[in-house]
Amino acid sequence: MGTFGVGPFDSDGAQDLLEDLASRAPQNRAEVLAALLRLPIADPESVGREVFADEVVAAVAVIVTGSPEVPAAEVPRLAELAAAALPIVTESWGQGWTSPADAAAASDTVKRLSEALRTIC
């Protein structure tokens, strides 16, 4: 059983993504994020099978925080992909929380990420 929290980096999947990005050469990190974000866009049914909501939420957070994992020149392209992918995984992200407070906090996480994306796009 994995660890899962309401913040964008509070899951094993998010931590795995961060570790994967850190292990790659800086010039390859943007493509890793882009490939991850393209999965739910190309096939929304892939959510929960090939890509997981926590991974997409973490990828969006990496993009909007201006993380060093993302070259500045790639941010606009990645932000557009993130803006398209995030709504697709929102329903999956919002399911299964053990308390109403966690569900509300998870929803707030998505709302803040969406707002941040609007400032970039």
Image: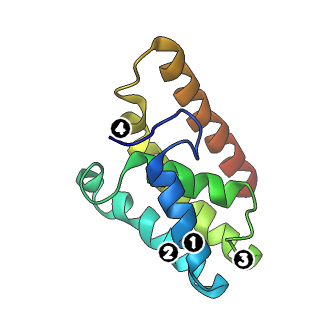
Q: Position of residue 30 (x, y in %)?
A: 59, 76
For the residue marked with disc 2, what is the amino acid? Answer: Val
Q: Nearer the viewer, mark 1 or mark 4?
A: 1
**Of pointers 1 and 4, the one earlier in the residue sequence:** 1
Q: Is residue 72 above or below residue 81?
A: below
> Could you classify mark 1 by the number of other residues whose Cα lies within 10 Å: few (under 14), some (14-19), or many (20 or more)?
some
76 sits left or right of 43 in the view: right
Specify the label residue 92 is tagged with. Answer: 4
Q: Secondary structure at mark 4?
A: helix
Task: Say if mark 4 contacts mark 3, CB within 8 Å.
Answer: no
> Could you classify mark 2 by the number of other residues whose Cα lies within 10 Å: few (under 14), some (14-19), or many (20 or more)?
some
For the residue marked with disc 3, what is the amino acid? Answer: Pro
- What quarter of the picture does the C terminus occupy? bottom right
Q: CA distance from mark 3 to mark 2?
A: 12 Å
Q: CA distance from mark 1 to mark 4?
A: 24 Å
Q: Secondary structure at mark 3?
A: loop
Task: Say if mark 2 contacts mark 1, CB within 8 Å.
Answer: yes
Q: Nearer the viewer, mark 3 or mark 1?
A: 1
Q: Which residue is mark 1?
A: 21
Q: Position of residue 102 (x, y in %)?
A: 51, 21
For the residue marked with disc 1, what is the amino acid? Answer: Leu
Q: CA distance from mark 3 to mark 1?
A: 12 Å
The count of marks equals: 4
**Of pointers 3 and 1, the one earlier in the residue sequence:** 1
Q: Which residue is mark 3?
A: 71
Residue furthest front in the image: 1
**Of pointers 2 and 1, the one earlier in the residue sequence:** 1
Q: Which residue is mark 2?
A: 32
> Could you classify mark 3 by the number of other residues whose Cα lies within 10 Å: few (under 14), some (14-19), or many (20 or more)?
some
Q: In this orientation, which residue lies closer to the viewer: 9 or 45? A: 9
